[in-house]
């Protein structure tokens, strides 16, 4: 069952890239306080995710912060080493926290699985964007396929 507006972000362990390697962190610690925008992508380095979805949030990071967003985070079912390399390739810097959901625990807990086994990508997460306030979902937009329409940075900005 997909998480709904009004529900609390599940508390699971994820990893974030750090200066000395991956760091394990609970989602509540990472994303559970303040106003948070969490968006999910089917894969690091995949074309739409890499050329449009992530760069849109990097470009709009200051605008989102001006609207009171404390943390912008991007999750994918990829390991923290891949997420680190992706962040460097896309020059993310400190604008977006990259969240590695390598074993899809967070994806499953959110009910946002996407089966891309037929395309050789295995289990991934759907493309989505959510607004959280102190760990509670205030808005959720999930794409119907792998395309990008309702979960862009501009769409999120318009809701803040
Ligand atoms: C893309 O980001 O373009 C993409 C994501 C998953 C599968 C295929 C393409």
Image: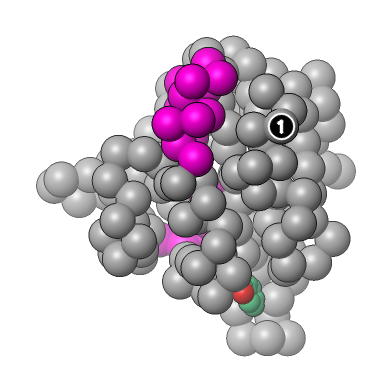
Q: Is residue 90 above or below residue 63?
A: below
Q: Is residue 113 left or right of residue 11?
A: right
**Total tally of numbered discs in the picture:** 1
- Give the crowd class for mark 1: few <14, some 14-19, many >=20 residues within 10 Å: few
Is residue 19 rendered to the left or right of residue 135?
left
- In-front residue for pair 143/81: 143
Examine the structure image and report whether residue 69 is included in the region drawn in magenta. Answer: yes
Question: Can you say whether 126 is above or below 136 in the image?
Answer: below
Q: Residue at x 76, y 56 (%)?
A: 149
Q: In this figure, which residue is indicated by the disc labeled 1? A: 158
Q: Is residue 50 above or below residue 84?
A: below
Taking the spot 83% from the left edge, 31% from the top edge, the residue there is 4
| Residue that appears at 72% across and 68% down | 146
- At horizontal 47% and vertical 24% (from top left) the residue drawn is 65
Along the line of sight, which residue is nearer the eye, 36 or 114? 36
Q: Please give the range of residues in magenta.
A: 60-79
Q: Quadrant of ligand 1?
A: bottom right
* Left or right position of 26 against 90: right
Give the color scheme: rainbow, by chain, secondary structure or one colour: one colour
């Amino acid at each position: 069952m997909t998480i709904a507006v009004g529900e609390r972000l599940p508390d699971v362990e994820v990893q974030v890239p750090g200066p000395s390697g991956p760091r394990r962190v609970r989602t509540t610690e990472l994303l559970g306080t303040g106003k948070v925008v969490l968006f999910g992508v089917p894969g690091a380095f995949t074309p739409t995710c890499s050329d449009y979805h992530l760069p849109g949030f990097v470009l709009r990071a200051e605008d989102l912060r001006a609207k009171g967003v404390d943390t912008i985070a991007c999750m994918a079912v990829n390991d923290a080493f891949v997420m680190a390399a992706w962040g460097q390739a896309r020059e993310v810097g400190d604008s977006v926290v990259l969240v590695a959901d390598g074993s899809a625990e967070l994806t499953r807990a959110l009910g946002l699985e996407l089966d891309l086994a037929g395309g050789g990508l295995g289990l991934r997460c759907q493309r989505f964007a959510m607004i959280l306030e102190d760990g509670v979902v205030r808005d959720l937009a999930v794409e119907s396929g792998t395309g990008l329409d309702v979960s862009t940075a501009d769409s999120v900005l318009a809701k803040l």
